[in-house]
Image: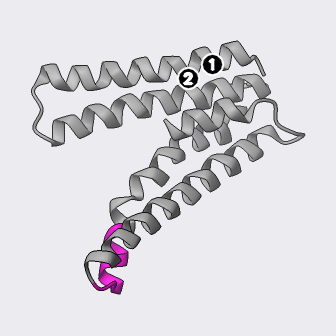
Amino acid sequence: MLAASVVVGAGTLGPYPRVQLVVLLLSTGVVFWAAHVFSRLFGARIVNRLTWPVIRSEARKERPIIEAAVPPAVAAAISPWFGLGPQGVVWLALVVALIGQVGWATLAASRAGASRRLMLLAGAINLFLGLLIVLLKVALQH
């Protein structure tokens, strides 16, 4: 959802929209990852002593935040292959982010041992939330 929100919030970018969108997606992913790692480490520090193995472990656990930004960033980067203009780049990145969102939610439910029904529900809820982001994009029309 973070990547989709970044794409919607990006609106019309400057003279290099593809590059700017790629940098914005990846840097936002890294900043949010760092914030999550820091907050988890702060909580771990209160309970236990902070060590390098704990830091590495927490950094790995939060890695999906960065990973979620990569596919839409790649989509924006390769958009010239599809002959897309600036708005097409934004829409392509948004669609890729939403597909990733639904896919990760369904995979997480599967890995948690959820039934097929719950997996479908997790995917459907994430699709609904993603569509809300698309509606926001349409309403803002930037």
The quarter of the picture where residue 113 lies is top left
Residue 92 horizontal/vertical position (percent): 61, 26
Q: Residue at x 58, y 59 (%)?
A: 31
**Helix, strand, or loop for circle 2?**
helix
Horizontally, residue 107 falls left or right of residue 15, namely: left
Task: Specify the label residue 136 is tagged with.
Answer: 1
Q: Is residue 42 left or right of residue 118?
A: right
Q: Is residue 39 magenta?
A: no
Q: Specify start and end residues of the magenta stretch as a single range.
A: 49-58
Residue plotted at (41% across, 33% down)? 101
Residue position for label 2: 133
Compared to residue 137, the image places residue 71 above or below, namely below
- Name the residue located 32 percent from the left edge and 76 percent from the top edge: 46
Q: Nearer the viewer, residue 3 or 51?
A: 51
Query: What kind of residue is marked 2?
Result: Ile
Q: Secondary structure at mark 1?
A: helix
Q: Are marks 2 and 1 in contact (CB under 8 Å)?
A: yes
The percent coordinates of residue 61 (x first, y second) are 33, 61
The C terminus sits in image quarter? top right
Q: How is the image coloured?
A: one colour
The answer for how far apart the CA atoms under marks 2 and 1 are is 5 Å
**45 sits to left or right of 116:** right
Q: Is residue 3 above or below residue 84?
A: below
Q: Please identify the quarter of the rendering in which residue 55 is found.
A: bottom left
Amino acid carrying label 1: it is Leu
10 Å crowding of disc 2: few (<14), some (14-19), many (20+): many
